Image: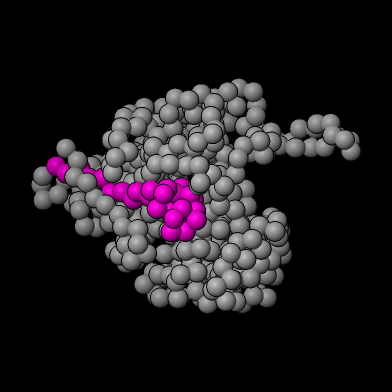
């Protein structure tokens, strides 16, 4: 399989390090707006011969992306950029006749008058508007194929297929005990994306009500995470699983809650109150005259790059899916989970735990598509495909998953 990887940041670089060890990949073009980043990712893989090459590419330039896909004879485009660039990359892949995978879906917009009650534009709406066109193309757009969304959706499918007869609730629960030495505030994932998902109105799904929204950081609960992480307070956050899972799995309620912590929430609220979460550009003075910048981009530029924090980071991160329902007439409650220890991911791959955990899942998915174990056309979420081949291959990658009976 020949793949165009767009985005050579922390997750993209981790993708290259994971894919380099797998035989299904014949060539990967690593593309980034910053050619030096793409070249650095490729340069670290010299022992793998000429299977990787670097190119400069503007992810917002749909025609340029389509041209690269054609020139490089790519079978698939893997989007490892932030959600601002989903639509041009998504459109370019369809125009070029290639498969498409992403780890975050097209952006949402809150309801104009009732943002904390009703959905406006939902995550992924812009993509699903093209479902018929993708179906006619005969190509697969596998959306939300990271860890959350992604592996969490695979867990939901596995639970529905093998563990439950009837599902009351599917709740994705994410928590960690990661710490970064030397920093009072150093997010382990893209602050741009974190601000987007944490300050937007969270979406909840209920079968008799459909999708609706609540206030940010609502419905706090303490969830006990496995493998020594322990209890972490989790709150509602906008996330793709809530929009994807109900499309293919019958559940009466679907939620997503993230373990943020009081200090992190307080900082996000302060950014919002100061307008520093905005993506609208403002004019500021500079040595060469007035320039336009986005406040959120300034915040991101002032914080350390999450990809560089691995050497200072300790602890584990856990992604998982809690499911409650019945099996054979009896109540059942389980938590399916995947834990990555930062010490292990740094030792084995040189990537910090959060970006490695995100990156491994689309590589597994690409291998399944290459082998034919996963196939289809149109726009599909991970829960639309058989879960067992994915979970077995994830284990074969040296990163097993777990299942904990609750109660």
At 22% from the left edge and 46% from the top edge, which residue is drawn?
Answer: 404
Residue 147 lies left or right of residue 404; in this view the side is right
Residue 127 visible in rendering: no
- Residue 266 is situated, as x and y percent measured from the top left of the image, at 51, 23
Image quarter (top left, top right, bottom left or bottom right) of the C terminus: top left
- Residue 328 is situated, as x and y percent measured from the top left of the image, at 11, 51
Is 175 above or below relative to 45? above
Range shown magenta = 331-357
Residue 195 in magenta stretch:
no
Residue 104 visible in rendering: yes
Residue 334 in magenta stretch:
yes
Residue 142 lies left or right of residue 205; in this view the side is right
Quadrant for residue 5, please give it.
bottom right
Q: Residue furthest right?
A: 288
Residues 138 and 280: in front is 280
Residue 249 lies left or right of residue 137; in this view the side is left
Is 209 above or below relative to 21? above
At 45% from the left edge and 36% from the top edge, which residue is drawn?
Answer: 179
Q: Residue furthest left?
A: 329
- Counting labels gives 0
At 56% from the left edge and 68% from the top edge, which residue is drawn?
Answer: 45
Residues 137 and 195: in front is 195
How is this picture coloured? one colour
- Residue 12 is situated, as x and y percent measured from the top left of the image, at 56, 57
Quadrant for residue 361, please give it.
bottom left
Is 313 above or below relative to 25? above
- Residue 56 is situated, as x and y percent measured from the top left of the image, at 71, 62
At 76% from the left edge and 32% from the top edge, which residue is drawn?
Answer: 282
């Amino acid at each position: 399989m020949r793949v165009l990887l767009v985005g050579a940041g922390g997750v993209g670089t981790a993708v290259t390090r994971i894919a380099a060890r797998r035989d299904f990949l014949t060539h990967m073009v690593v593309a980034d707006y910053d050619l030096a980043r793409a070249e650095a990712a490729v340069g670290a893989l010299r022992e793998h011969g000429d299977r990787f090459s670097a190119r400069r590419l503007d992810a917002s330039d749909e025609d340029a992306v389509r041209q690269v896909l054609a020139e490089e004879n790519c079978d698939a485009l893997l989007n490892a950029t932030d959600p601002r660039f989903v639509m041009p990359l998504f459109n370019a892949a369809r125009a070029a006749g290639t498969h498409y995978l992403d780890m975050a879906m097209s952006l949402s917009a809150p309801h104009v008058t009732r943002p904390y009650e009703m959905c406006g534009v939902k995550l992924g709406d812009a993509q699903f508007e093209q479902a018929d066109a993708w179906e006619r193309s005969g190509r697969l757009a596998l959306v939300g194929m990271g860890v959350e969304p992604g592996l969490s959706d695979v867990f939901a499918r596995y639970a529905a297929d093998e563990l439950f007869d009837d599902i009351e609730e599917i709740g994705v629960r994410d928590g960690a005990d990661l710490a970064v030495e030397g920093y009072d505030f150093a997010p382990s994932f893209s602050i741009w994306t974190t601000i987007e998902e944490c300050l937007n109105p969270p979406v909840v799904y209920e079968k008799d009500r459909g999708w609706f929204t609540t206030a940010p950081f609502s419905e706090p609960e303490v969830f006990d995470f496995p493998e020594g992480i322990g209890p972490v307070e989790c709150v509602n956050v906008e996330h793709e699983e809530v929009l994807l899972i109900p499309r293919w799995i019958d559940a009466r309620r679907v939620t997503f809650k993230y373990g943020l912590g009081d200090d992190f929430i307080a900082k996000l609220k302060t950014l919002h109150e100061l307008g520093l979460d905005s993506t609208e550009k403002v004019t500021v003075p500079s040595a060469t005259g007035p320039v336009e910048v986005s406040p959120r981009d300034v915040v991101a530029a002032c914080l350390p790059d999450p990809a560089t924090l691995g050497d200072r980071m300790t602890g584990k991160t856990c992604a998982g899916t809690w499911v409650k329902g019945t099996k054979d007439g009896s109540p059942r409650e389980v938590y399916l989970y995947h834990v990555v220890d930062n010490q292990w991911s740094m030792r084995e791959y040189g990537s910090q735990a959060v970006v490695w955990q995100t990156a491994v899942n689309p590589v597994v998915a690409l291998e399944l598509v290459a082998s034919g174990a996963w196939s289809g056309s149109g726009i599909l979420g991970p829960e639309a495909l058989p879960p067992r081949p994915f979970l077995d291959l994830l284990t074969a990658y040296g990163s097993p998953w777990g299942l904990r009976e609750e109660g």
